[in-house]
Image: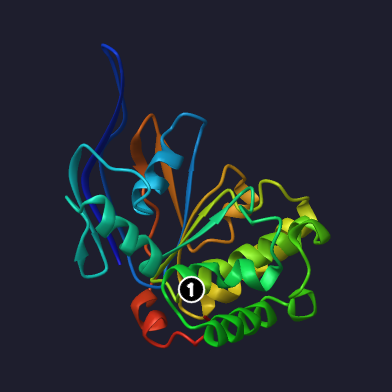
């Protein structure tokens, strides 16, 4: 599903240049649930942004499923993000003035789906994450855990190949965080490919594989999950 080969990322400020990622090589199979860990400044969020096509790398190559991402222009990257990648953020990133179901349906609006299809898809996914009775609520009327469930439903709405999660439990208490990770576990069992950044070992333990970064290098890629492709082939239509 994901093949990174020799990925290097640099940031420049005036005459200063900082290399954040050094020749990263990492393969993630379809259906794997991978947690990326590392100390602050290790490059884990930068790596996740590159996997999610939110940023560009300076050297190397990247294939997402059957598509070579290397060298795509901004328009093609935006199309790729909208159709093949679902994003889940620590801060939820919900629009406060519209209801839960409208937040979930928003990516379908950008994709040009008809109104009836958007609403039905959003309601089905809110039911899937246990929030059918909160569809008309505004984000401010929901708890943190409920808001994150809405965000997960939104990430699934266009049936992406990969879910990219950046500290998805970072704003939640421990009990609510465990509930969210239980939901991630269900998605993983259904065959979803998930790549998650976290600094919490308890959260990372929910993944099938842990990748450790240190100073922009992969120091431990973990053991790839067996039968991951088989699981992906039999993925339930959860989204």
Q: Residue at x 54, y 68 (%)?
A: 106
Please count the marks in the image: 1
The residue lying toward the viewer, choosing from 221 and 71, is 71
Percent x, y of residue 189: 53, 78
Residue 168 in sight in this render: yes
Residue 153 in sight in this render: no
Relative to 202, residue 16 above or below: above
Which quadrant of the structure image shows residue 75?
bottom left
Percent x, y of residue 195: 45, 58
Left or right: where 129 falls relative to 10: right
Classed neighbour count for the residue bearing mark 1: other residues with Cα under 10 Å, few (<14), some (14–19), many (≥20) = many
In the picture of the structure, the residue carrying the numbered disc 1 is: 108
The residue lying toward the viewer, choosing from 211 and 179, is 179
Percent x, y of residue 89: 57, 52
Q: Residue furthest top?
A: 15
Q: Residue at x 21, y 66 (%)?
A: 67
Q: How is the image coloured?
A: rainbow
Relative to 17, residue 61 above or below: below
Left or right: where 87 falls relative to 62: right
Instruction: Classify mark 1: helix, strand or loop.
Output: helix
* Quarter containing the N terminus: bottom left
Q: Residue at x 55, y 80 (%)?
A: 118
Percent x, y of residue 64: 27, 63
Which quadrant of the structure image shows residue 187?
bottom right
Relative to 55, residue 189 above or below: below
Left or right: where 225 falls relative to 119: left
Which quadrant of the structure image shows residue 30?
bottom left
The residue lying toward the viewer, choosing from 123 and 211, is 123
């Amino acid at each position: 599903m994901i093949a990174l080969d020799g990925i290097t990322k640099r940031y420049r400020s005036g005459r200063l240049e900082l290399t954040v990622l050094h020749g990263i090589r990492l393969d993630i199979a379809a259906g794997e649930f991978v947690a990326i860990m590392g100390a602050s400044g290790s490059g884990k969020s930068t790596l996740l942004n590159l996997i999610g096509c939110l940023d560009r790398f300076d050297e190397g190559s990247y294939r997402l499923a059957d598509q070579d991402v290397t060298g795509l222009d901004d328009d093609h990257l935006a199309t790729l993000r909208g159709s093949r990648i679902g994003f889940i953020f620590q801060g939820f990133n919900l629009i406060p003035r519209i209801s839960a179901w409208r937040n979930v349906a928003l990516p379908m609006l950008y994709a040009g789906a008809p109104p009836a299809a958007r609403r039905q898809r959003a309601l089905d996914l809110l039911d899937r994450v246990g929030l059918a009775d909160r569809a008309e609520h505004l984000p401010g009327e929901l708890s943190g855990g409920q808001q994150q469930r809405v965000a997960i439903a939104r990430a699934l709405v266009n049936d992406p190949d990969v879910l990219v999660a950046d500290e998805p439990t970072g704003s939640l208490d421990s009990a609510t965080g465990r509930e969210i990770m239980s939901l991630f576990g269900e998605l993983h069992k259904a065959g979803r490919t998930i790549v998650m950044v976290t600094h919490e070992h308890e959260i990372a333990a929910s993944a099938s594989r842990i990748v450790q970064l240190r100073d922009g290098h992969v120091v431990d890629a973990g053991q790839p999950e067996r039968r991951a492709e088989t699981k992906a082939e039999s993925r339930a239509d959860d989204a």
